[in-house]
Image: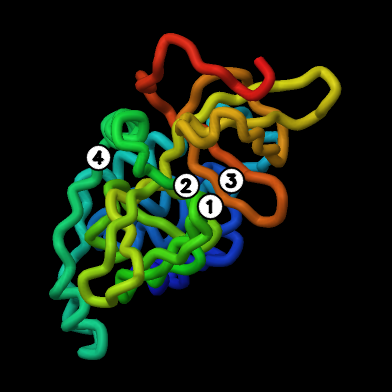
Amino acid sequence: MDLIGYLNSEKINVEKLKKHLKVIGFNLSKFSTIHEEQFPKLMELFKIVLEVDSQLTAIDKKLELGSKLDKILKGQTILSPTKTTTSKYKSKKDEFEKVSPKSPDQATNSIINSAFSSGNIKLGKVKFFDSIKGFGYIHSFDDKKECFVHASKLITLGIDEDDIVLFESINSKKKPGELDAINVTNQIPVFIVNKESTTISQVFPLLPNYLEKEISLSRKHETGFAIVTATNRGQYWRISIMPSESISKSESISLGEK
């Protein structure tokens, strides 16, 4: 039985679950590769997630839930299709490389260091991603180009439509003139700031091209460095702060006017 079938058998509202998972920075599609024996443990967490309120639930509870869900995801790989998988997708999934997801600290620190040393790290938004077929497209904010992304090129598990991601781009070998996205992560290192005159926070992604570009968030968050997952619909980013022991950063940075 696949995850959606299991959720239905447990009488869990899938659409409602998707919305509540977004509040703590997860997409349901991330869990499509979880082994069936993990489903009962996952259901316990999902039932708690359904009680999460975007405004009323304390941030520490959201972080704790996010940490527990992340532990289930860690070490998971894209699985070979089960016997019930249609032949239409079998050949595609058999071609996937196994993904060894890095921890939030490893992934973000690696990509920050690469960003400041090579300048090739880009910020973009997922236009769409098919978690079953394992591919999609990312719109680059830096050069306004569309980049093809394959599931084997993710360094953190799971991306979904409207997710903000960091990635590198290379020339496509299969389609000359087009770009492929590699080293894709939805974990964004940022610095969050607050102004007395506003009721929402602003954020600066820790990338050379974005240290003077102020991005408005959908609500107020604590000032400081953070690793976040973010979605973008309209002019605001909606973020969820991920638990992290350390964030790679320089001794000082210049943000906008200060």
For residue 1, which quarter of the picture? bottom left
**For the residue labelled by badge 3, is the local secondary structure a helix, a strand or a loop?**
helix
Q: Which mark is residue 23?
A: 3
Query: What residue is at 62 percent from the left and 19 percent from the top?
Result: 223
Depth check, front residue: 43 or 161: 161
> Disc 2 vs disc 3: Cβ atoms closer than 8 Å?
no
Secondary structure type for disc 1: loop
Q: Which residue is mark 1?
A: 141
- Mark 1 belongs to which amino acid? Phe
The residue to which callout 2 is attached is 123
In space, the residues marked 1 and 2 are separated at their CA atoms by 6 Å
Nearest to N terminus: mark 2 or mark 4: 4
Residue 243 in the image: state x and y as whole percent.
42, 28
Q: Is the residue under label 1 in contact with that under label 4 (CB below 8 Å)?
A: no
Give x and y (percent) for residue 54.
Answer: 67, 42
- The nearer-to-camera label among 2 and 3 is 2
Seen as rendered, the residue at the extreme bottom is 87
Q: Pointer 3: residues within 10 angstroms few (<14), some, or many (20+)? A: many
Is residue 124 visible in this depiction of the protein? yes
Q: Are marks 1 and 2 in contact (CB under 8 Å)?
A: yes
